[in-house]
Image: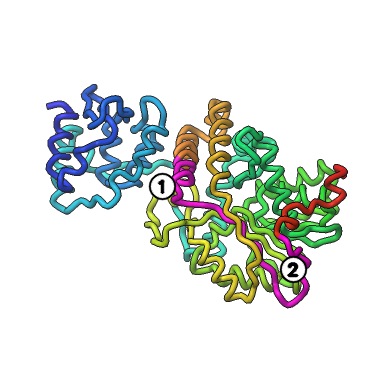
């Protein structure tokens, strides 16, 4: 019996037959094919029994992800055509009897070795210690960001900004849209010469450098990634801004006794965790001068139900990362006696950004693989394309939330249009 015929028989007899109605065609290592319901459906290739082995031991998103990352599962054509079906089997569960039937069939078509636990791809995160402790958070962040500065330069382009850009229209270059996003943050914060700016999770320093160059601020940035900090410091020296830009390898919770006029957190709070949001907001308030402004730019869930923590993203991309409805963040800000002044959704901007990053990765594919290996290249393709589709479908979004410490004058204009249009003379003149 062919692998496809055996698979067809077992799928028809489990989970009420739901798994037998496949939205994709599957081609197995023996050349047999399990056809989709719809002609012309995308083709998934299980080129090795290892793909079945991964799914047998983790019959969920994680098993599929491991098979994709280790290369035993691939796609004939465009991965996007497969990922549009990513929620097709949500809610399907396997009973113990179902799993026994699958195991017996797998052993018959792929040999008894398939019953042994499969090797886990080398790039999968494995963290120790208390969740969101200083040591574990440091390890989680470094798993993602300490990959290679050169790899991120290929991926992100010269802006070196790893958060969604702000497009005037779809024809904008990525670099122009990232510059516009940096300036949007500076304008919302009302930055002025001499302001003390803190950038929590400063990455490679792009916001600090923009703010120091165009707005005359003195900036401090913190990151948990030493390679990021080293490159940010080098960029500051190259631009002769080392007297106005300081970058430290530190957790935001380790900053004590410092006071800032303005604080930004861009693409960082996703690492904080729901249990730590109140502490995060209190820490920001303690570091903000009376009347100071804080802008939080971060991804949020639109659904209120917390997803499982054992996902592809949590194992391969952002370990311990958590997405919450924006209301959770706003409630934490209120608990810390911070006043919410402005909220803006940038959801439509993120899929454009992710697709531009994917274009960069595709254009430099061989270089990227040479830098970080095939497993990470495959993981990043899956993560960015799946994320783009999730933003487009309204499953996740991204917000900028502007708050003030209300025990002093904040200086915000009465008209929100004026807030977004307020560009200092120094920026207009290119100073």
| Residue at figure coordinates x 23%, y 52% from the top left | 93
Q: Earlier in the sequence, mark 1 or mark 2?
A: 2
The numbered mark at residue 65 is: none
- Residue 282's quadrant in the figure? bottom right
Q: Residue 398 colored magenta?
A: yes
- CB atoms of marks 1 and 2 within 8 Å: no
Bounds of the magenta segment = 386-415
> Can you identify the residue that label 1 sits on?
312
> Can you identify the residue that label 2 sits on?
292
Q: Is residue 123 visible?
A: no
**Left or right: 61 with respect to 5?**
right
Q: Give the foreground label among 1 and 2.
A: 2
Q: Nearer the viewer, residue 338 or 234?
A: 338
The C terminus lies in quadrant: top right
Within 10 angstroms of label 1, few (less than 14), some, or many (20 or more) residues?
A: many
The colouring scheme, among rainbow, by chain, secondary structure or one colour, is rainbow
Q: Is residue 105 visible?
A: yes
Within 10 angstroms of label 2, few (less than 14), some, or many (20 or more) residues?
A: many
Q: Nearer the viewer, residue 403 or 359?
A: 403
Q: Residue 29 colored magenta?
A: no
Image coordinates of residue 131 in percent, x first then y, are 47, 64
Q: Secondary structure at mark 2?
A: strand
Image coordinates of residue 245 in percent, x first then y, are 79, 53
| Residue at figure coordinates x 47%, y 32% from the top left | 374
**Left or right: 186 with respect to 278?**
right
The N terminus lies in quadrant: top left
**Left or right: 218 with respect to 121?**
right
- Residue 339's quadrant in the figure? bottom right
Q: Secondary structure at mark 1?
A: helix
| Residue at figure coordinates x 68%, y 47% from the top left | 181
Q: Nearer the viewer, residue 66 or 430?
A: 430
């Amino acid at each position: 019996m062919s692998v496809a015929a055996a698979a067809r028989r077992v799928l028809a007899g489990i989970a009420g037959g739901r798994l037998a109605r496949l939205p994709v065609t599957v081609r197995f290592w023996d050349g047999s094919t399990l056809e989709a319901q719809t002609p012309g459906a995308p083709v998934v290739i299980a080129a090795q029994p290892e793909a079945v082995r991964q799914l047998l031991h983790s019959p969920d998103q994680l098993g599929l992800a491991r098979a994709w990352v280790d290369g035993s599962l691939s796609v004939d054509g465009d991965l996007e055509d497969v990922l549009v079906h990513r929620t097709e089997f949500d809610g399907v569960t396997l009973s113990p009897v179902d799993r026994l039937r699958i195991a017996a069939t797998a052993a018959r078509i792929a040999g008894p070795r398939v019953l042994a636990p499969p090797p886990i791809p080398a790039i999968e995160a494995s963290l120790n210690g208390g969740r969101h402790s200083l040591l574990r958070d440091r390890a989680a962040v470094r798993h993602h960001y300490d990959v290679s500065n050169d790899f991120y330069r290929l991926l992100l382009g010269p802006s070196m900004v790893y958060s969604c850009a702000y497009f005037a229209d779809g024809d904008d270059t990525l670099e122009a849209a990232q510059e516009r996003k940096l300036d949007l943050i500076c304008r919302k914060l009302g930055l002025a010469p001499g302001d003390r700016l803190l950038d929590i999770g400063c990455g490679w320093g792009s916001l600090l450098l923009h703010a120091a160059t165009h707005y005359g601020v003195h900036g401090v940035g913190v990151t948990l990634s030493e390679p990021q900090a080293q490159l940010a410091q080098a960029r500051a020296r190259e631009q002769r801004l080392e007297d106005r830009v300081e970058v430290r390898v530190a957790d935001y919770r380790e900053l004590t006794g410092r006071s800032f006029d303005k604080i930004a957190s861009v693409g960082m709070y996703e690492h904080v965790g729901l249990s730590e949001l109140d502490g995060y907001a209190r820490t920001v308030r303690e570091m903000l001068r009376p009347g100071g402004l804080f802008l939080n730019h971060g991804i949020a869930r639109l659904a209120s139900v917390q997803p499982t923590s054992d996902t592809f993203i949590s194992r391969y991309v952002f370990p311990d990362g958590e997405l919450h409805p924006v209301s959770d963040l706003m409630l934490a800000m209120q608990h810390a006696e911070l006043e919410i002044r402005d909220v803006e959704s940038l959801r439509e901007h993120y899929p454009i950004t992710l697709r531009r990053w994917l274009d960069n990765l595709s254009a430099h594919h061989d270089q990227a693989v040479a830098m970080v290996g095939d497993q990470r290249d495959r993981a990043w393709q899956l993560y960015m394309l799946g994320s783009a589709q999730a933003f487009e479908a309204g499953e996740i979004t991204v917000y900028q939330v502007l708050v003030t410490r209300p025990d002093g004058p904040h200086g915000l204009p009465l008209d929100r249009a004026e807030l977004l249009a307020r560009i200092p003379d120094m920026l207009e003149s290119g100073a």
